[in-house]
Image (tube, helix red, strand yellow):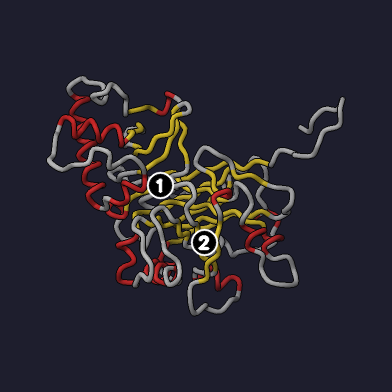
Amino acid sequence: MGAPEPPEANPESVKLVHFLLGDQFHFGMLTDANEYVDLDTACRDYFGVNPVKGADPSRFRDMRAFFAGGPESVDLTKKILDYIDRRRKAGWTPRAATGARYLFKAEEGVRLLAPVINGVKIYCLASNSRSHLAEQGKPIPKQPYAFTRFFNSLVGPNEPLVLHDAGTFPDIEVELAAVIGKAGKHITPAQAFDHIAGYTIALDMGYRDLQYPGEGPADWVMGKGFDASMAVGPWIVPKEELGSPYPLRMELKVGAEVRQTGDTNDYLFRLPEVVAHLSRGITLEPGDLISLGTLGGTPGFEFGKETRRLKPGDAVEGSIERIGRLVIPVKAEASLRPVAPGTAPPA
């Protein structure tokens, strides 16, 4: 028998997305029918037809506003979806009272973006799975160990990971990422899940030769901070929809080759410990991303093995149970070297 298919998103779950139609940015969700709903416009229409005293029709103006609503945002989204379904069965095309559309199809040119708010803080856990520590022969750490990324390194579902010629050994990992929904500092482990909005998939690319340059400490900025070196998406599944993040099956493929497989029970430090650790001196804010780290390789980490080196033309596929699948192409950075007059630019 062949390997099982990677899991798709839970067909009943709310999937929060950012998307473009033309040059117009939208916040919304992707439906089971692969249609995109602008939740801000749809919410205004819903309350226009179903007035509720004191209701805020602009509560879905962006991802942060959605997070602020907590479980009520998820419940209202399901009511809006039911409202859209009833309108469609009545033969109507869903439009707001202003005449603005809020339901779009993929074939209309929708471009899915990373479901991450511009400017958020990104924390990545290292040495956080038992299998990864075992294959490296490292001792169990006594507390979570995190490094940071910046927004320049992120790409979304319709963008490639970019290989830069400054590094020679690009490698890739799949990770579960949690999204903060409620601001807080000095958060206790018991309070941690109150501050988490939902979950997404992260594909963490790094340059092993730059990360471990030989003598001296690891260089996380050069190893993990290059432009277009981390993919996130394709959506955020709210915590109310996903339930416990332990265990969730995880798999990484490059082309047809399975590189990693396992589940989130392998993580050494779980979210309550990680959130409490980070928030001791840092205010976590809505939209902040915490990527929980890699699992071990399959079979073994095999650091330095030529077959692990990413190449232009590769397709990287990460999947996590009850969240979905994120497929990202890999391409080489276009040459930035000046071209002499009268010569052809590099292919």
Residue drawn at x 50%, y 61% is 123
Q: Position of residue 265 (x, y in %)?
A: 40, 66
The amino acid at mark 1 is: Gly
Q: Nearer the viewer, residue 208 or 71?
A: 71
Label 1 vs label 2: CA separation? 20 Å
Q: Residue 333 in the image: state x and y as whole percent.
A: 69, 41
14, 99: nearer the viewer: 99
Outermost residue to the front: 54
Snapshot quadrant of residue 81: top left
**Earlier along the polypeptide chain: callout 1 or callout 2?**
2
Q: Which residue is mark 2?
A: 124
Q: Is residue 259 visible?
A: no
Q: Is residue 319 above or below residue 134?
A: above
Q: Which residue is mark 1?
A: 324
Instruction: Answer few, some or many: residues within 10 Å of disc 2's Cα (few below 14, many 20 plus, some between 14 and 19).
Output: many
Q: Is residue 242 left or right of residue 179?
A: left
Q: Which secondary structure, mark 1?
A: strand
Where residue 187 appears, as percent x and y from the top left, is 35, 69
